[in-house]
Amino acid sequence: MTASAPSFPAELTDLVREHVREIPDFPAPGVLFRDITPLLADGPAFEGLVQGLAEKYRGRVDAVAGLESRGFILAAPLAIELGVGMITVRKAGRLPGPVIGVDYALEYGTARMELRPETIQEGQRVLVIDDVLATGGTGAAAIELVERSGGEVVALAMLLELAALGGRRKLDGYRVDSVLIY
């Protein structure tokens, strides 16, 4: 799949765009950081985002898997709105065992994501959600964890996608829905 246009209605994309703050040279020179805290701090805008996400996935998923850490902020209210459970996909060492884990590559080094496999039921339809799709490593790790636990990844929902980093390529074969694509 190539990143061409956001997967959500223009009104939702505009809502997010209006509430994302761009901070140049953070956390390092040359980096343009997209800050979602203004969106989260605006109650009606945050509610509109959650309702817009829920509209797309209502009746299609049995659980929402939030990726640590900002994915949790999106997953929890979305799961409540959909009336389904929330699954936490965490960084290494943050869940009590037993857990399964997947290592994935970062620009310099590796990281590990973990999941308690019993939190997913066999055949459960899972929506994976995170704030940013960059290189795709975290999303790919989450897919592997959900599937190893017996779940089916219905889609990956991303608030923001940084298309130039090519993360969508690592998620080839899976539906990736991004609200706002840069």
Image (tube, rainbow, N blue to C red):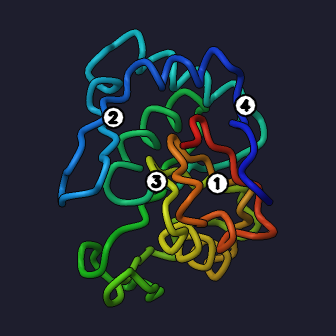
Mark 3 residue type: Gly
Indicate the secondary structure of the residue bearing disc 2: loop
Query: How many angstroms separate mark 2 from mark 3 (CA)?
Result: 16 Å
**Mark 1 → mark 3, Cα distance in angstroms:** 10 Å
Upstream in sequence: badge 4 or badge 2: 2
What's the residue type where badge 2 is placed?
A: Ile
Residue at 63 percent across and 28 percent down: it is 54
- From the image, tell me which residue sits under label 3: 66
At 35% across and 88% down in the image, what residue appears? 110
Q: CA distance from mark 1 to mark 2?
A: 18 Å
Q: Within 10 angstroms of label 4, few (less than 14), some, or many (20 or more) residues?
A: few
Q: Which picture quadrant has residue 105?
A: bottom left
Which mark is first along the chain, 2 or 1?
2
Amino acid carrying label 4: it is Lys
Question: Residue at the location (59% across, 25% down)?
Answer: 13
Q: Quadrant of residue 115?
A: bottom left
In front: mark 2 or mark 3? 2
Counting residues from the start of the chain, the first of labels 1 and 4 encountered is 4
| Mark-to-mark CA distance, 4 and 3 | 17 Å
Question: Which of disc 3 and disc 2 is earlier in sequence?
Answer: 2
List the residue tagged with mark 1. Answer: 156
Q: Which residue is mark 4?
A: 56
Quadrant of the frame with the N terminus: bottom right
Where 140 falls versus 35 (above or below)? below
Q: From the image, state whether disc 1 or disc 3 is nearer to you.
A: 1
Q: Which image quarter is the C terminus in?
A: top right
Image mark count: 4
Rendered view: 134 above or below 182: below
Residue drawn at (19%, 51%) of the image: 26
